[in-house]
Image (cartoon, rainbow, N blue to C red):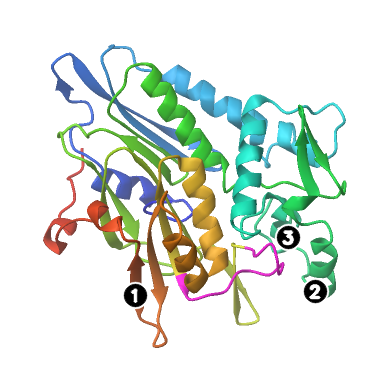
Amino acid sequence: MILADKIWSPLKRLLWLFLLISGITSCTADWKYHFQEGLIYGSTYHVVYEYKERKPLTRDIEQILTRINNSMSIYDSTSLISRINRNDPEALLDEDLKYVLQQGLEISTETGGSFDMTVAPLVNAWGFGFKKREEVTSELIDSLLEFTGYQLIRIEGDRLVKVDPRVMIDLNALVPGYVADLIGAFLESKGVQNYLVEIGGELRCRGLNPKGTLWRVGVDKPLEGLIDRQIQVVLNLGEISVTTSGNYRKFYEEGGVKYSHTIDPVSGYPARSTLLSATVLMRNCIDADAWATAFMVMGLDRAKEVVNARDDLEVYFIYSDEEGNFQTWESAGMGRYLQESMEEQQQPDPQP
């Protein structure tokens, strides 16, 4: 998630416009940049792309958004994933859902369960899902862990098979990234070489902005409760996907204890570590989306070990030191995406 965690407000759009580009509707020869935005999946989306035809691709993009909503929205009781969660015997996987589930299972295995789609009952119990929060006790968590675990599901043909019928799937850490990938691929199929797609804060881009420079996107400082958000760093992006996960805004407090929305699928409790924000860059947005979530569960030390062992991602971590001060850690190749100077960072692209 860029510029904001998965809590949205009108300011999100202002920040987006502030950092993004100038001259959205400007023309370069016969090509024109089009801008599309709206509400989807309980959040917002923005698409900017250079397209030769006068008529924009608005309807095609909306059809992709609607198709995936009908398939994977856990907040729509008629969606395919909701029917699967209810064990509807006639709920067969479509190609989109099958692909997302396969990716989720693969990343669950690679992360040793730090990422896990079967976390839905736990997320609901803690009040961050599609059901009302329960009174959390150790007995409740233990009971929910009995049917939590990616090993309890498998794909057989066009069906998702559950070892335990109580298993429920939560795709919130996969769907926005997947949709960004879908729209990006669709734009490329139409000959679009320059675009930026943002779905619920998860972002995929390619080429250049209307000024002929790399896309410039800001990452929030992990500050709680601020209306006027502050930018930690600006990224210069070409052909890449990027997403940020953090626990500093989406939480609730009870009895003086803060409970974050990132739930550890292994312990059943909200993840707690010094890692405040994880920004991940990868080729595909669905992968970056899932890995950002996984790193928040892993915590700083293990996340750094995993990153150092891989060559398919770059990261920018913000964490708290022993004195409570913000510190950062970045992977070896991350530097080429970072704004070159603080002066440039403080002067982002003007509003269109």
Report the side of 100 relative to 336 (left or right).
right
Which structural element holds mark 2?
loop
Which structural element holds mark 3?
helix
Report the side of 89 relative to 38 (left or right).
right
Q: Is residue 202 above or below residue 244?
A: above
- The magenta-colored residue range is 263-275
Q: Position of residue 66 (x, y in %)?
A: 57, 26
Q: Real-space Cα distance between discs 1 and 2?
A: 34 Å
Report the side of 348 relative to 143 (left or right).
left
Give the amino acid at mark 1: Gln
Report the side of 27 relative to 139 (left or right).
left
Q: Position of residue 336 (x, y in %)?
A: 23, 53
Q: Real-space Cα distance between discs 2 and 3?
A: 12 Å
> Does the segment drawn in magenta span residue 265?
yes
Q: 10 Å neighbourhood of mark 2: few (<14), some, or many (≥20)?
A: few
Q: Position of residue 192 (x, y in %)?
A: 31, 21
Q: Is 163 in front, or is 144?
A: 163
Q: Is 37 in front, or is 240?
A: 240
Label located before the other in sequence (2 or 3): 3
* Circle number at residue 191: none
Q: Is 278 in front, or is 344?
A: 278
Whether residue 171 appears in this view of the structure is: no
Q: Give the residue number, with chain letter if any, for mark 2.
A: 137
Q: Give the residue number, with chain letter if any, for mark 3.
A: 122
Q: Quadrant of the C terminus?
A: top left
Which structural element holds mark 1?
strand
Question: Could you say which quadrant of the image residue 136 lies in?
Answer: bottom right
Q: Give the residue number, with chain letter if any, for mark 1.
A: 327
> Does the segment drawn in magenta span residue 258?
no
